[in-house]
Amino acid sequence: NDISRQEVMTVISKSFPRGYASGNPGFTDSDSIAAWAKPHVNFLVKLGIVGGYEDGTIRPTNYITRAEIAKIFFGLY
């Protein structure tokens, strides 16, 4: 099944210890990030593991591509 970008970011974020890298990265579509996913998206963005698109969006509800998930995993190591 397909999985959204915000769902992937939530799963990955939950594998990290808490206590740092908070804040709002300020994407133009930040309002479309689900409330349950927002702290996880912000966390991974602040760590530099996930970034937005050139147009200033994060596109949280889009389905993630294989290339995007590969980039995230590469950023973890």
Image: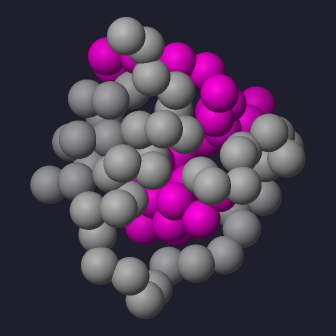
In the image, is residue 24 part of the stretch drawn in magenta?
A: no
Give the prevailing secondary structure in the magenta stretch.
Answer: loop
- Which residue lies most toward the top here? 1
In the image, which residues are magenta?
38-67
Give the percent coordinates (x, y) of residue 60.
Answer: 64, 35
Residue 50 counted in the magenta span:
yes
Taking the image as drawn, is residue 56 in sight?
no
Name the spot of residue 58 as percent of width and height, x first.
66, 38
Seen in the image, is 33 located left or right of residue 50?
right
Depicted 62 relative to depicted 60: above or below: above
Point out the image quarter for the C terminus.
bottom left
Residue at 29% x, 69% y is: 16
User: Measuring 26% from the left and 62% from the top, which residue is drawn there?
Assistant: 15
Snapshot quadrant of residue 48: bottom left
Figure check: 42 above or below 60: below
The colour scheme of the drawn protein is one colour
